[in-house]
Image (cartoon, grey):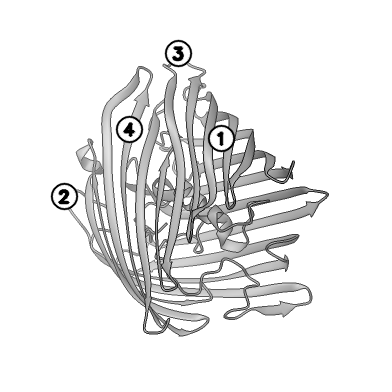
Amino acid sequence: MRMCRRGTVSRGGWLAIGLLALGLCSAPLAGRADVGYAMRGDARPFHHWDSMFNNTQDASAGQGLVWRAGDVDVRPTLGTWLVADDNIFLSHTNAVDDTYWTLAPGVVLLYGQADDNYLTANYEFENTDYADNSGEDFESHLFSAGLQYLARGYTTHVSDQFSQTTDTDPESAQRVKRLDNTADARVDRQISRRTGADVHGRYDVVSYDSDTYLDYNDVSGGLEFRHQTWPKTHLTLGGDYGRVNVKGDGDIGDADYVEAAVGLRGEPVSRTSVEARLGYQHREFDADYDTIDTWVASVGAARTFWRESVAGVNISRRLLPSSQAEGLTRVPLTIAPYVQHEILRDRLALSVSGGYETADYYDANGKTDRSDERWYVTGLLDGRLHDALTVGVGYTREEQDADVMDDSYTQNLVFVRALVNY
């Protein structure tokens, strides 16, 4: 999933579930485990300027710079990019342009093997400085860690993903410092040659630096059964129970929810990977609010047309507590396709990606009249100078058309970058 974001383009509201779904497509099915940045469903921590080169999916891949320290693989990373932004405050009427520079060192550690027992951790620090508006300078931190353990037919996978950065809240179209932490746990059991099941749990924490935004946490757990209906494809059936707690006065917005879902996972067609989940959620609030009954989805699909070309799409729909008003629920639907193609004997890569999102809102009386729309398109040209080194240029255009006129904006970004082991 590919979206440009450098301090002014939203990350979380757009593509998080779609990224996760696509990332899981390439994971081992038994544990659905990921190593390094891929635990987030994206090879890079905060931005989505994707490249076919230097993809840190596996610290032990043997490409680029991988150092050995005893039994631990150490994969350093370093990125830098210079961006010209024509609307750094996402203003509807008074756009301010500026240029900013980011330096991002990091490291991925792996003990064990990605398809076996392992421990992994990665950390990245990003420092962003604006040329004319130094008050907008910020720092970002990413940390993730994971464990996978296989024993007696069981696969246990535990991970935690933490990020803190200045990001754009899609509901208000304002930049705000935000902390996200997601803890996942899954225990998988192969029951027979064709069937299996897993028990899983998830705990999300979203916290804003500003008191004008609403923090919340979301804890859920459930059970999923799978059946290998075709040689390389599983059908899944599962259910989850969850609890949302909004950190405000009283319990306005606090809710319980139940979700049932069916899914498809594997390679239903040659050279095509799919991770799809379609469900129905019933959300009931503690306060005297109408319940929400609606569909949810997480779909990631990718197809390799030949060795040099890949195309895919990510689709997601989910329910999120409003960042602005207690009791308001935001329901974004995102559709985001992408195409990547290598040319000149794997030395150049061209990538085009896009996304469209429409967001509905529910209050105490049910669905409201508010509906926001947003779209973006990004084009990239990357050159591989070495197995570990990529340089590239790119362009992004994004527009939001919100019912609240002040939340509408248009933005253009032009950037150059250099990536080592990304």
The residue pinned by badge 4 equals 360
Q: Alpha carbon of mark 1 to alpha carbon of mark 2: how far?
A: 36 Å
Q: Give the secondary structure at mark 2.
A: loop
The residue pinned by badge 1 equals 218
Q: Nearer the viewer, residue 336 or 71?
A: 336
Rendered-image quadrant of the N terminus: bottom left
Binning the other alpha carbons within 10 Å of mark 3 as few (below 14), some (14 to 19) or many (20 upward) gives: few
Residue 131 visible (yes or no): no
Q: Mark 4 belongs to which amino acid? A: Asp
Depth-wise, is mark 1 or mark 2 nearer the camera? 1
Q: Alpha carbon of mark 1 to alpha carbon of mark 3: how far?
A: 20 Å
Residue 121 position within the rendered picture, expressed as x and y whole percent measured from the top left: 66, 62
Q: Give the secondary structure at mark 3.
A: loop
Depth-wise, is mark 4 or mark 1 nearer the camera? 4
Q: Give the secondary structure at mark 1.
A: strand
Mark number displayed over residue 93: 2
Residue 413 position within the rendered picture, expressed as x and y whole percent measured from the top left: 28, 65
Q: Mark 1 belongs to which amino acid? A: Asp
Q: In terms of sequence position, does the residue under pointer 1 or pointer 3 come before the other? A: 1
- Give me the residue at 44% from left, 79% from top: 390
- Give me the residue at 59% from left, 31% from top: 240
Residue 349 position within the rendered picture, expressed as x and y whole percent measured from the top left: 37, 75
Q: In terms of sequence position, does the residue under pointer 4 or pointer 3 come before the other? A: 3
Tell me whether the residue at label 4 lies in contact with that at label 3, contact meaning CB atoms closer than 8 angstroms: no
The residue pinned by badge 3 equals 288
Binning the other alpha carbons within 10 Å of mark 4 as few (below 14), some (14 to 19) or many (20 upward) gives: some
